[in-house]
Amino acid sequence: MGGISRAEVRTEEWGGRCWLRLTGEVRLENQGGFIQMGVDLAPDRGPVDLSGYGGIRLVVRGNGELYGCHLRTMDCRRPWQSYRQAFIAPPEPVTVLLPFADFVPHRVETPLDPGFLRRLALVAIGRAFTADLAVAEVAFQP
């Protein structure tokens, strides 16, 4: 996409837990503006049916900045399409609850259907800043 943002993802031990940590610089030049760490939920089997769950639970820590959780479903055919919800990652670990009902469609016409999830990403996006986001737990909750 032409952006010049830079990022690193690594694992680390902190507070007796294993964390996946995204650090980097989000830059806006050259149509840029994001860095992310993500996972395909079932790359070989198609979408995952999470319609029996109410949302996502994250255990995160960071640098007090605003981050996003982006979900992609079978309805997201273009790279810029997703369902989004923001959260703050303070310096000390917190549990963040993200109900599926609160995800907002971004450049996609249909509402989020958790019965067809393909990908989950944690994203630093939309403004120039230093990102530092660590996650110890990602879970789906009733």
Image (cartoon, rainbow, N blue to C red):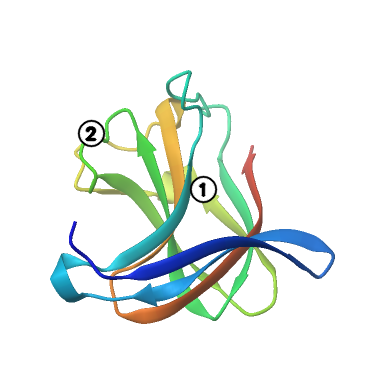
Say if 45 sits above or below 15 in the image.
Answer: above
Q: Which residue is drawn at 68% across and 60% down?
A: 19
Q: Which amino acid does label 1 sit on?
A: Pro
Q: In which quarter of the image is residue 140?
A: top right
**How far is the residue under mark 2 from the one under mark 1?**
23 Å
Q: Which of 63 and 31 is in front in this view?
A: 31
Residue of label 2: 77
Residue of label 1: 99
Apparent side of residue 107 relative to residue 89 in the rendered image (left or right): left
Residue 139 on image: x %, y %:
64, 44
- The kind of secondary structure element at disc 1 is strand
Say if 92 sits above or below 118 in the image.
Answer: below
| Within-10-Å neighbours for mark 2: few <14, some 14–19, many 20+ | few
- The kind of secondary structure element at disc 2 is loop
Q: Which of 94 and 40 is in front in this view?
A: 40
Q: Residue at x 45, y 50 (%)?
A: 121
Q: Which amino acid does label 2 sit on?
A: Arg
The C terminus: image quadrant: top right
Q: In which quarter of the image is residue 12?
A: bottom right
